[in-house]
Amino acid sequence: MQNTSGRRKAAVARVYLKEGNGTITVNHRSFETYFPLPWHRTSISSPLTVTDNEGKFDVNVNVRGGGISGQAEAIRLGIAKALTDLNAEFKPALRAAGFMTRDSRVVERKKSGQKKARKRFQFSKR
């Protein structure tokens, strides 16, 4: 059993990978009910598809924080890291697909004296 973590924006996913029949559970719910959009489900299962491991591992995930897209990408990174811990030969294929890099983009903070992070209040000359 492998356990790793994945992060994206404000989302943190703890991924537990063990040999099984390919069920994916997210926060004690089925993967299909937690992620209703098909592209989120495709994104999450893509590391297993790239390494030809679909149906070979059970994935149990605890995820907190952020939104649904950030959580999906955090889970994808966690699964990719768990697969490389199991077998280092998966790493080149996962890296080529872009699954091994943590996307470090986060929301910029709001500055004082401004409306938002970069938007300013309207300037009035008179």
Image (spheres, rainbow, N blue to C red):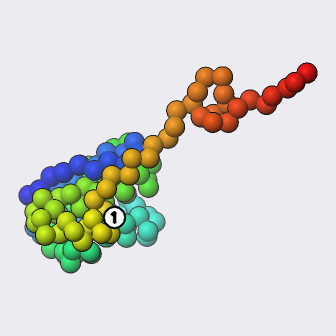
Instruction: Using the image, determine if residue 74 lies above or below residue 57.
Output: above
Instruction: Using the image, determine if residue 93 lies above or below residue 2.
Output: below
Q: Nearer the viewer, residue 18 or 121?
A: 121
Q: Nearer the viewer, residue 68 or 46?
A: 46
Location of the C terminus (image quadrant)? top right
Tell whether 61 sits left or right of 125. Answer: left
**Image spot of residue 71 (x, y percent):** 37, 52
Q: Residue furthest right?
A: 126
Query: How many neighbours does mark 1 have within 10 angstroms: few (below 14), some (14-19), or many (20 or more)?
Result: some
Q: Residue furthest bottom?
A: 52
- Residue 29 in sight here: no
Kind of residue at badge 1: Gly
**Image spot of residue 110 (x, y percent):** 57, 30
How many callouts does the rendering have?
Answer: 1
- Residue 7 in sight here: yes
Q: Residue sitting at 28 percent across and 50 percent down?
A: 6
**Image spot of residue 23 (x, y percent):** 22, 68
Query: In which quarter of the view is residue 91 placed?
Result: bottom left
Q: Nearer the viewer, residue 30 or 55?
A: 55
Location of the N terminus (image quadrant)? bottom left
Q: Secondary structure at mark 1?
A: loop
Tell whether 104 sits left or right of 80. Answer: right
**Image spot of residue 67 (x, y percent):** 45, 48
Instruction: Using the image, determine if residue 56 lies above or below residue 77.
Output: below
Q: Residue sitting at 17 percent across and 58 percent down?
A: 82
Residue at image mark 1: 98
Q: Residue sitting at 41 percent across and 64 percent down?
A: 40
Q: Residue sitting at 13 percent across and 70 percent down?
A: 89
Q: Nearer the viewer, residue 42 or 88?
A: 88
Query: In which quarter of the view is residue 122 placed?
Result: top right
